């Protein structure tokens, strides 16, 4: 909980600077690529989370990553700052909080969609449009995950709201109806 | 004649007077006896009447006690019968409710089991038989239902 609050504080600070520079989306993409690199490398992730490693080392590694990814100065400085404060382990949470702030700026919602088979482009566009209308005109970004455990259709999670368009859901409702008699 | 008169006087004096006195005494005694007998008879009659009266009272009391006892017994019997009837009714109702609950439970259990089997079979069939076009149709239908 404490780390989440800290992550939100860092994200808010970065968001303010990015908005002032008019580059919120670019910064979000750069931050996401950094998180992807860190997450994809167990050694890097360990280095950032291990308490024994000095802040200067973490800062150096962060700046090296920033340089290799050729991210903007703002992101490079931000990574250096976070690593220098020994908060690099919070990067995924910071990136998530930052993305939520940018999404709120542009009235955008991210919807996690579990599907039995991958959606085609047309379905994805139509689903985003329909969900956007249902959410009061929000722009919807679909984060699709193929879930082989699903029989068919999809389940969309929008925060506390769930749109169940799966066969599993239909069967569950059918089971409930039959059990009730 | 004189002698006879003297004799008569002597006899009168020696025999008649004592005899008369004796007879009078006897008559008095007899009268007293008769009066005593009458009194005893009256007393006996009174006692008999009293005794009869007591018998009547005792009989009446016995009758009253018997009637009260009979009435009480009848009331007790009525109460016992009523209590037994109520108890029997409760037992019947309880047994009926228990039976109905058992039937309902068994029916629900059966329905659940049949439902589980039906859904499991449906799942297996669906998983085996779904082709891509059906997947597409399910997705399209679900998208079309959003917001309705």
Image: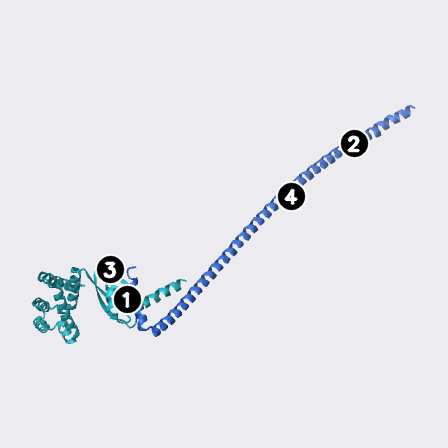
Q: Colour of chain B?
A: blue
Q: Is residue B55 depicted above or below A95 in this figure? A: above
Tell me, by letter, which chain the rendering colours cyan: A
The residue where tag 3 is placed is: A133
The answer as to whether the residues below labels 2 and 1 share one chain is no
Gap between marks 4 and 2, in whole Å? 46 Å
The first of marks 4 and 2 along the sequence is: 2
From the image, state whether disc 3 or disc 1 is nearer to you.
3
Label drawn at residue A155: 1
For residue B45, above or below residue A86: above
Most distant residue in the right direction: B1
Q: Which residue is mark 2?
A: B27
Q: Chain of mark 4?
A: B
Q: Quadrant of the C terminus of chain A?
A: bottom left
At 54% across and 52% down in the image, what residue appears?
B82
Q: Nearer the viewer, residue B51 or B100?
A: B100
Please, what secondary structure does the residue beneath circle 3 have? helix
The answer to whether residue B107 is seen in the rendering is yes
Disc 1 vs disc 4: which is toward the camera?
A: 1
Q: CA distance from mark 2 to mark 1?
A: 145 Å
Query: How packed is label 3: few (under 14 Cα within 10 Å), some, or many (20 or more)?
Result: some
Q: Of the residues tagged 4 and 3, which is closer to the observer? A: 3
Classify 10 Å Cα crowding around label 1: few (below 14), some (14-19), many (20 and above).
many
Disc 1, SS: strand
Label 4: element kind:
helix
Q: Residue at the spot x=31%, y=68% of the render?
A: B137
């Amino acid at each position: 909980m404490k780390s989440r609050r800290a992550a939100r504080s860092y994200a808010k600070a970065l968001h303010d600077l990015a908005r002032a520079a008019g580059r919120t989306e670019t910064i979000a993409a750069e931050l996401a690529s950094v998180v992807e690199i860190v997450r994809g490398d167990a050694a890097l992730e360990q280095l950032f989370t291990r308490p024994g490693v000095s802040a200067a080392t973490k800062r150096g590694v962060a700046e090296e990553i920033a340089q290799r990814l050729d991210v903007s100065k703002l992101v490079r400085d931000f990574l250096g700052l976070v690593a220098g404060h020994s908060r690099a382990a919070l990067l995924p949470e910071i990136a998530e909080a930052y993305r939520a702030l940018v999404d709120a700026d542009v009235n955008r919602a991210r919807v996690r969609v579990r599907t039995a088979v991958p959606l085609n482009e047309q379905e994805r566009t139509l689903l985003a449009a329909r969900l956007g209308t249902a959410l009061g005109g929000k722009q919807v970004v679909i984060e699709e995950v193929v879930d082989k455990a699903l029989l068919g259709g999809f389940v969309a999670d929008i925060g506390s709201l769930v749109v169940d368009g799966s066969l599993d859901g239909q069967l569950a409702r059918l089971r409930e109806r039959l059990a009730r008699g | 004649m004189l002698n006879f008169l003297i004799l008569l006087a002597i006899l009168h004096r020696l025999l008649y007077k004592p005899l008369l006195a004796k007879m009078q005494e006897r008559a008095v005694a007899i009268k007293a006896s008769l009066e005593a007998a009458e009194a005893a008879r009256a007393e006996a009659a009174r006692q008999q009447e009293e005794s009869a009266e007591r018998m009547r009272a005792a009989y009446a009391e016995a009758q009253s006690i018997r009637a009260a006892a009979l009435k009480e017994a009848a009331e007790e019997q009525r109460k016992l019968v009523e209590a037994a009837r109520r108890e029997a009714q409760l037992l019947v109702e309880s047994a009926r409710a228990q039976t109905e609950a058992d039937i309902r439970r068994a029916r629900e259990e059966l329905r659940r089991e049949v439902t589980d089997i039906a859904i499991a079979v449906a799942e297996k069939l669906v998983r085996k038989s779904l082709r891509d076009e059906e997947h597409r149709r399910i997705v399209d239908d679900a998208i079309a239902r959003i917001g309705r």
